[in-house]
Image (cartoon, helix red, strand yellow):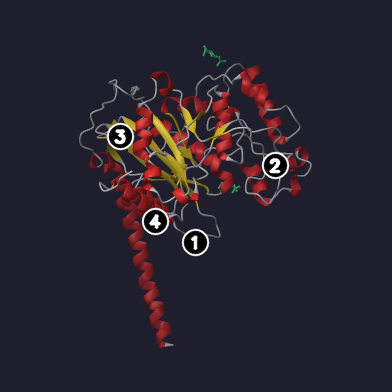
Amino acid sequence: MAVFHRMKSYSRVFAATLVTCTVLVIIYSTLTLEVAGTHRDLPDISVKPGIDHPTFRVRPATADVKPNQVQISHVRTLAIQVSPGFRSAIPQSSAFWNRKLHSGLKTLDKAGNLTQPDINGNSTPESTESLQTNIADFNAYPSLYQDFLRSMHFRSPDVLINQPNKCTSRGKPDQVTLLLGIKSVPGNFEERQAVRETWGQEGVYEDSLLVRTVFLLGRSGSDDPDLTHLLSFEAQQFEDLLVWDFKDSFYNLTLKEHVFIKWSLQHCPQASFIFKGDDDVFVNTKAILKYLKSLEPAKMSKLYVGQIISQASPHRDPKIKYYVPPTFYDGPYLPYAGGGGFVFSGALLESLFSISRYIPFYPIDDVYTGMCFHALGIPPEKHSGFQTFDIREQDRGNPCVHRDLLVVHRRSPQQAIRLWRSMKSPLLMC
Ligand SMILES: *[C@@H]1O[C@H](CO)[C@@H](O)[C@H](O)[C@H]1NC(C)=O
Ligand SMILES: *[C@@H]1O[C@H](CO)[C@@H](O)[C@H](O)[C@H]1NC(C)=O
């Protein structure tokens, strides 16, 4: 009994401490967000906005970058043309997605070049009745698929944790060469830390190339342990987490991509290039920068590069993660860069964001991205250094092999750290 009483009072003390700490964390994180611009100043950034760098076209920063601004209600969209190639590549069929796309395009054609679904990009939600009417076997869809369909109109979740000063110093936009957007999930603390300690290190590379890193997260599900406090601590400590108010799940990865593009437009539109990939890949950041530097000027503003998957079609076996019901999508996949890691030009952010309003969300994010680039008339570029399905087993621990690669899937946090160390070692002989 006494033990029980003491436990009760301990737990009261504990609860009180927890509440106090939470309040302090909130106050502190508000403060850090406000001063973040001043303590992330980096030495020796020789590239200044508005000045043309010999190897990178430096776009003048747009007026959208405002320090300390937590959320801008909407971003500008461009009048946009959907490529004829894309229109004809997606069959006009009775499958739900195909019908949704083509009826959207018809509306677009009738209304002229631009009328938006709505200011936030949300279209009208489909009721279950409407889904059952339009998809004969909707009730037989896996329940996660049904969830996806019910929420596929939803494009504007709130930002729960933001880094509005990620790409600015002293209130001015930094000339970011490469922005790394890394898909993670709330529980992957170790993966994120390994990335921070290795290929995701922020700073100036090769004397002038500035790299910035953000991790892209949704919320944990309602049955998962509550990681909110750990995440706000992590965000405050490292200033690299972006968390949005949607359930972090496989079928919501297209939504994650969409909000990342929107975030980049709002807070890092001056980035020359954007890498998007998983937290369990190994990236040779220096090799990527070297490759980007070697690009012809014409390519720099129109790049979409990675491991290209062409001639793929949807999986029709419900047991497979990438399953797509025939009554949902009909047709081949357009060539796309594997979502484990790919790179594109920052100059394309605005067009990508604009075009995506006319392309309904797809349950598989990299397939969706491929469609958007296709609709913009930008073909994917193949590069053999992107190995999103991994390399020969005997080469997987070999730092020499990794020196020539740009992206490899997948490496554990420990493998990433070992590889990074040996690749940096002056003793390494290849
Ligand atoms: C269509 O685009 C042209 C040029 O981009 C623009 O001048 C015109 O106002 C646009 N029309 C509509 C309806 O948005
Ligand atoms: C995606 O996120 C939304 C918002 O949290 C949620 O309602 C929906 O169920 C999620 N979709 C899936 C397939 O998890």
Q: Could you tell me how far apart the alpha carbons at marks 3 and 4 are, in whole angstroms?
A: 26 Å
User: In the visual, does 188 lie left or right of 123?
Assistant: left
Identify the residue at image location x=58%, y=39%.
154
| Residue at disc 3, secondary structure | strand
The mark total stands at 4
Q: Can residue 61 be seen at all in this image of the molecule?
A: yes
Q: Could you tell me how far apart the alpha carbons at marks 2 and 3 are, in whole angstroms?
A: 46 Å
Q: Which residue is mark 3?
A: 210
Identify the residue at image location x=60%, y=16%.
112
State which tag comes first along the sequence, 4 or 2.
Answer: 2
User: In the visual, does 145 lie left or right of 191?
Assistant: right
Task: Say if disc 3 is inside 8 Å of ligand 1.
Answer: no
Q: Which residue is mark 2?
A: 127
Mark number for residue 414?
Answer: 4
Label 3 Cα neighbours within 10 Å, binned few <14 / some 14-19 / many ≥20? many
Farthest residue toward the left?
43
Residue type, numbered disc 2: Ser
